[in-house]
Image: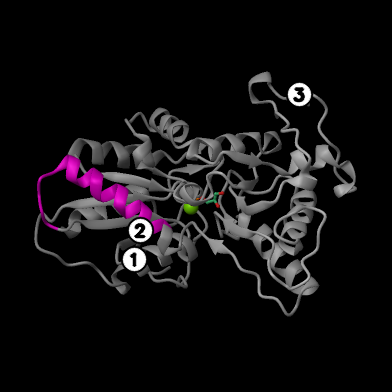
């Protein structure tokens, strides 16, 4: 067991403003289940008027829906501007790729939900792998085009986009959530990487990558209701890299990675947090920001690199031992993390 005292502790002038960034899975929730201390922790911060945001590598929902769900779970009032999901950080890409053809990958309902999220960000021409499978069912022999409605609730039913993909050059592939159909998704992503200028069915003759790649969540493992950590989107990303490397050993795969621990996500989140702090207090002093997370590779590494304090909890991926990325403190749960931070001021 590693004691908190072994780790660097924060010292500051008294009553310095305090703000928090909370990870969700493994800190506030286990799958659908709420971690009981989390409710107390969030309600305590509300009572003290301490600003906080949520940064999760999870995705596949709209920010306002996730804010509503968290509000309901913890009986608090969360606004969508407090919610940074894995793909939230890709919103600015819509400025450049608005009118381009993009393939969004991941999630249930044949990617319909993630398509709608991308459209809400401003992307005008969003396709999903199932659209391509419906266009040519031979593109991957082990997947079948969905039957109409496919037993899904009407409101969430996949809606095919009918186009001739022989005439639709893609500019980018954006992985929004874990793939629910690894074989098909991997085939189409690799086809597009190797294509000539993003056109399905063509092969680049000069080694130029056919499309840009944007991956939202690097987590190899994460925490759910299951007793042991589960593989996340990182598994699929590693598989893409490996398949590409075996098929094209001389060509480096070009891609942009978002999500914790990457700075792009912390910068985006910090911007939201600073606006929230400004709204809540008129202090001009720089606040002490504490990231509370369960994954040293993700939450803690990212927070440390960004210059935030970091509290590692034992309710998720991390259980014991010396973590690879040393947090400011190690505590049993999120309530303990909040209490620790309040004491440090
Ligand atoms: O898919 C979500 C997962 O990889 C991690 O979520 O909330 O622990 O960042 P979170
Ligand atoms: Mg987590």
Q: Position of residue 34 (x, y in %)?
A: 46, 37
Q: Position of residue 54 (x, y in %)?
A: 38, 46
Marks 1 and 2, the one that precedes in the sequence: 2
Q: Is residue 278 above or below residue 204?
A: above
Give the extent of the magenta segment: 265-285
Q: Is residue 81 or residue 288 the one in the foreground? A: 81
Q: Quadrant of the C terminus?
A: bottom left
- Residue located at (13% from left, 56% from top): 16
Q: Position of residue 201 (x, y in %)?
A: 82, 54
Q: Is residue 29 above or below residue 324?
A: above
Among the 4 quarters of the image, the one containing residue 229 = bottom right
Between marks 1 and 3 in the image, the one whose residue lies nearer the viewer = 3
Marks 1 and 3, the one that precedes in the sequence: 3
Between marks 1 and 2 in the image, the one whose residue lies nearer the viewer = 2
Q: Residues within 10 Å of mark 1 (few under 14, many from 20)?
A: some
Among the 4 quarters of the image, the one containing residue 70 = top left
For mark 2, what is the residue?
A: 267
Q: Is residue 82 or residue 337 the one in the foreground? A: 82
For mark 3, what is the residue?
A: 149
Q: Is residue 67 left or right of residue 201?
A: left
Q: Main secondary structure of the magenta part?
A: helix
């Amino acid at each position: 067991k590693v004691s908190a005292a072994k780790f660097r502790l924060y010292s500051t002038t008294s009553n310095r403003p305090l703000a928090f960034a909370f990870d969700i899975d493994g800190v506030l929730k286990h799958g659908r289940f709420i971690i009981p201390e989390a409710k107390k922790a969030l309600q305590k911060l509300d009572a003290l008027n301490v600003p906080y945001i949520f940064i999760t590598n999870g995705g596949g929902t709209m920010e306002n829906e996730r804010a509503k769900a968290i509000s309901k779970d913890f009986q608090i009032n969360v606004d969508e501007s407090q919610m940074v999901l894995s793909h939230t950080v890709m919103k600015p890409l819509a400025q450049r790729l608005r009118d381009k053809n993009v393939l969004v990958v991941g999630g249930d309902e044949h990617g319909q939900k993630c398509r709608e999220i991308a459209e809400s960000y401003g992307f005008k021409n969003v396709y999903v792998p199932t659209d391509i499978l419906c266009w040519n069912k031979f593109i991957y022999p082990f997947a079948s085009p969905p039957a109409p409605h496919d037993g899904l609730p009407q409101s969430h039913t996949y809606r095919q986009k009918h186009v001739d993909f022989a005439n639709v050059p893609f500019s980018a592939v954006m992985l929004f959530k874990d793939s629910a159909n690894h074989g098909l998704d991997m085939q189409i992503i690799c086809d597009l990487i190797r294509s000539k200028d993003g056109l399905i069915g063509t092969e680049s003759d000069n080694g130029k990558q056919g499309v840009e790649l944007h991956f939202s969540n690097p987590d190899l493992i994460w925490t759910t209701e299951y007793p042991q950590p589960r593989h996340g989107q990182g598994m699929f990303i590693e598989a893409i890299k490996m398949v590409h490397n075996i098929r094209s050993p001389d060509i480096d795969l070009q891609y942009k990675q978002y999500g914790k621990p990457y700075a792009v996500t912390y910068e985006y989140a910090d911007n939201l947090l600073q606006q929230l702090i400004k709204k809540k207090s008129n202090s001009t002093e720089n606040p002490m920001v504490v990231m509370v997370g369960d994954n040293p590779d993700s939450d803690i590494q990212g927070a440390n690199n960004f210059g935030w304090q970091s509290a590692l909890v034992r309710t998720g991926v991390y259980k014991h031992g010396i973590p690879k990325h040393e947090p400011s403190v190690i505590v049993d749960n999120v309530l303990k993390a909040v209490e620790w931070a309040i004491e440090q001021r």
